[in-house]
Amino acid sequence: MTVVDGTVRFLPRAVDECSNERARSSTRDAARELHDAGLCLIPVAADGTKRPDVAWAPFLATRSTPDQHDQWFGTGRPVGIGVVYGKVSGNIEMIEFEGRAIAEGVLDEVTNVMHASGLGDVWQAITTGWVTRSPSGGLHFRVRIDGDSVPANLKLAARPARDDEYTPDERQRIAGNPHAQIKRILVETRGEGGYGIVEPSGGTVHASGKPYIRIAGSPAAIPTIDSKLMDAVRDICRTADRMPRPEPVRPSREPLPLPNGDLRPGDDYNLRADWAEILEPHGWTLVYHRDTRYWRRPGKDRGVSATTGHSPTGDRLYVFSTSTEFQAETPYTKFGAYTLLHHGGDYGHAAKALADLGYGTPRETRAIRRVPPHHFPVGDGRTVDTATGEIMAGPVAVEVVEAATEGSTSRDMPGVLPDAFWESHPILLHIRQAAHSRGCSSTLVLYGMLARLSGMLSHHIRAVTGIGGPASLNFFAALVGESGAGKSIAAALVRDLMPCLDEDFRDGMPLGSGEGIAEIYMGTVEEKTDEIHTKGPKKGEPVTRKVRKQVRHNAYFYADEGQSFTQLSERSGAILGESIRRAAIGETLGQTNATEERTRYIPAGSYSFGLLIGFQPSTARPLLADSNTGTPQRFFWGWESDPAMPDIAPPWPGEIDAHPGRRRPSGPLHIDFPERIKTLLWQDRVARVRNEIRVDRLDAHAGLMKVKAASLFALLFHHPEVTEADWELTEMLWQSSCAVRDFLLRRAEQEAEAERSREETGRVLQALRIREATMGADVRLERVLALACKHAAKVGGITFGALNKAVASRERKLVKDAVALGVTRGLLVVEGDSITVWTGG
């Protein structure tokens, strides 16, 4: 491969030679060549499916042998050759540029960026080491990674599918959900756990009937590249991504536009600032510029760390590196980047600073009517005094204030779900409209609905990821807001949005004690015994007895104020916290007692449990502090703020039709996940068990929490299994939850620090008061001593009685102490009642 005028060209001579060589080589000879290069092989079915022709799981860890190759490839039957990538083949990774990426100039653009960023020699080695052209026109490059293990298969770049590319199934999906995103892969890898077809596979191995062709190098010429350099190569390949990226959840989204065409300082800055003046003073370097600008972070001499001007949603900074101030793979506006770099993420301070520099529409002054305490507005400028019932006419008080133009800061609105989340599915739009029609935060309603749905679902519905057994979908949510924020309204609204007709469903139950939770599922029933009535009207019928046992399977619990929950949990001997933690994973509830009537036994997996708790920010602090027990890790956290609340209430959209809470399968119903997601979850689990990674205590259950939320989304959207789109929504929800949780932790730390500061200040002030009092007493004591010495120096000295009369009345209590001090210092002599001056005799 060579680069001519910025375009990738492959030499025809290499193609001809490799084609001739392939024609002369048999499949068995190719297998021998691949084996000699240290690769693990598997046969591929010749039916166009590209699937392995054997059970290939053992070959993820154990390399295939020449005897097996003879058995697979030496019989003459049609079969393709596949290479298993990763550790079993000596840390080999394959980078694939799809045929559409070649045709659309993606490889040309990536190659230009590689050369401009200082990775030209690395890229040249990769693209000439061993290159295969696929039947669809794509190119496969291989590299041996030196250092870290090979990552799993990665999707590095994609673009939205064009209308003429949709399959019939995709057209049907778009028709059912206009907001669905159909993507086409441009660049991807095959790594640990993956395989790929290689030459000379042909005929019916590929659906097109075309062969795989070697166009450069050979398996023996695979270059060895340092793992850090490969990270940089993948990052540059990621710059080719064309998919729309959702607005960031962390840091919080930009304020909404002002009316009348006015601009906030941040909005104005986005229009007028240039990325160079934002990034270059902080050590960033512009590497390459065509339509997109490619940037390298400070402290790095090769590669690319970020792009600007590439996002289809606007001129955003998109950082690939995890070694910068920015959150990786999150789009930042110019205002967002400026805020992070100059003001530590505080949007309020950043907006004020930009306003001082002349950005934004100048502020105006406006009058704000202040209603006194105990007054309630009743319209027409009147208020009623709630204490006396007196109605007061006219404005009570008017204060002229400066109108803030920067809007709410990130501290005011943690974890706001972006519009892209709500617009991704009609049911989510339905939920948001329902919330806005009642004046509620859409986030609070969403969490309330998920919690209630989880308690309403059949206990037979569970998630399967390959880790442990089938997972319970029991879902806990904490709604956080100041008093009057609408947490109770949101909790009540979900009953109208998602009604349940099951009479055995316990809806909105208070938590009470841990014993009470198990009792919700219990009841008394008549059961037959082995005895028979021998007389009376029931003669010949079985004798029955009343038995306490589990009689229901579904319950939804709601606590309006989280303070009561923490108080109940902290009681001596309370089992509420333990019961909540067990319910979160569907474990056995209840307790065994000596008497049958006090025994409660709810078997694992036999119940569904949803929990919603409302918190004020200050009352959430004890729960978050209880991370040692694992309780807060089992909650999703939602904040009251909803910047998308409209000025005029939309109409009530009605209940959600055919919601999954009404499904009642007779046996187990397992919700499956895509292989990519299951692989990610498994790799995370393995890394934890091997102690290769350390996870923050509050993120210990992140995987399980995402599995629950993704399963609920799949059920809500009537998907037979979790889709990649469901998982993307779950990731957004999890980021939002973490933003709220982290905000509450920071607030708790600030409040604790303020309390410590107040206590320390109190101690200092007390010490100062004691010191001042002591110093004042010392001064008065010295004054009385001086007076005693003066009078004692007279002929005959002075008596205690006379000295008492000589000093001020307020200091008479100090006379004895002052004289004693004088004796100690050798100034005075006391004989009986007489005080004289020491003369040294």
Image (tube, rainbow, N blue to C red):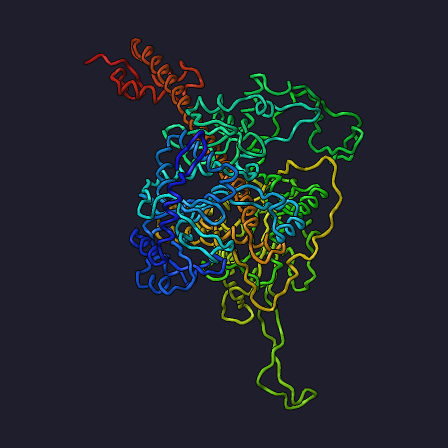
Specify whether residue 253 is in view: yes
Q: Position of residue 775 (x, y in %)?
A: 38, 20
Question: Is residue 80 or residue 319 the one in the foreground?
Answer: 80
Give the image location of residue 734, x and y in percent.
Answer: 53, 45
Q: Picture quarter containing residue 361?
A: top right
> Residue at (51%, 38%) from the top-left corner?
241
Tally the marks: 0
**Whole-percent x and y of residue 717?**
63, 53
The one of 784 and 353 positioned closer to us in this rendering: 353
Q: Is residue 697 visible?
A: no
701 or 467, nearer to the observer = 467
Q: Is residue 530 above or below residue 547?
A: below
The residue at the far left in this view is 841
> Which image quarter is the N terminus in?
top left
* Rendered-image quadrant of the C terminus: top left
- Residue 512, image quadrant: bottom right
Residue 746: x and y in percent read 49, 36
Work out whether residue 718 or residue 626 is closer to the camera in this orientation and state it.
718
Image height check: is 57 above or below 825? below
590 to the left or right of 11? right
